């Protein structure tokens, strides 16, 4: 895209490419978020709420918290 701008390409062509890249990055972000959420749910479902090692604490927070 930077090359397109440097080459003085038609504005609409540059904007079209920016839109395509933006949509692609949004899809990647949604995929990462979906994967993270699924892993957190699986971890929570498999953990024993009575076991401090799987429950997390202030000193060792869950990677899914926050």
Image (tube, grey):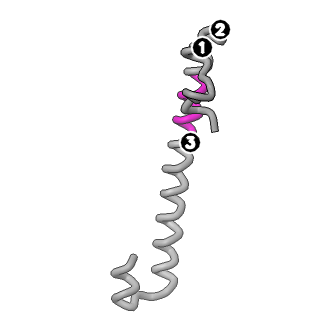
Distance between the alpha carbons at the discs numbered 2 and 1: 6 Å
Question: Where in the figure is residue 24, as x and y percent of width and height?
Answer: 49, 57
- Depth check, mark 3 against mark 1: the one in front is 1
Considering depth in this image, is 44 or 50 the residue closer to the camera? Answer: 50
Q: Are marks 2 and 3 in contact (CB under 8 Å)?
A: no
Q: Mark 3 highlights which residue?
A: 33
Q: Residues within 10 Å of mark 2 (few under 14, many from 20)?
A: few
Asked where in the image residue 9 lies, by quadrant, the reply is bottom left
Q: Mark 1 highlights which residue?
A: 52
Q: Residues within 10 Å of mark 1 (few under 14, many from 20)?
A: few
Magenta stretch mostly in which secondary structure? Answer: helix
Q: Which residues are magenta?
A: 34-42
- Answer left or right for 59 relative to 24: right
* Secondary structure beneath label 2: loop
Question: Where in the figure is residue 19, as x and y percent of width and height?
Answer: 53, 69
* Secondary structure beneath label 3: helix
Distance between the alpha carbons at the discs numbered 2 and 3: 28 Å
Residue at 49%, 50% in the rendered image: 28
Answer above or below: position of 38 versus 33.
Answer: above
Q: Mark 2 highlights which residue?
A: 50
What quarter of the picture does the N terminus occupy? bottom left
- Depth check, mark 2 against mark 3: the one in front is 2
Distance between the alpha carbons at the discs numbered 3 and 1: 26 Å
Numbered tag placed on residue 65 in the rendering: none
Question: Where in the figure is residue 4, as x and y percent of width and height?
Answer: 37, 82
Residue at 49%, 57% in the rendered image: 25
Earlier sequence position, callout 2 versus callout 3 = 3
Question: Where in the figure is residue 62, as x and y percent of width and height?
Answer: 57, 28
Answer above or below: position of 26 versus 30.
Answer: below
Earlier sequence position, callout 3 versus callout 1 = 3
Considering depth in this image, is 59 or 34 the residue closer to the camera? Answer: 59
What quarter of the picture does the C terminus occupy? top right
């Amino acid at each position: 895209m930077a090359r397109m701008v440097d080459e003085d390409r038609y504005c609409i062509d540059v904007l079209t490419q920016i839109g395509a890249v933006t949509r692609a990055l949004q899809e990647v972000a949604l995929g990462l978020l979906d994967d993270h959420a699924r892993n957190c749910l699986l971890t929570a479902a498999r953990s024993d709420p009575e076991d401090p090692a799987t429950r997390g604490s202030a000193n060792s927070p869950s990677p899914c918290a926050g």
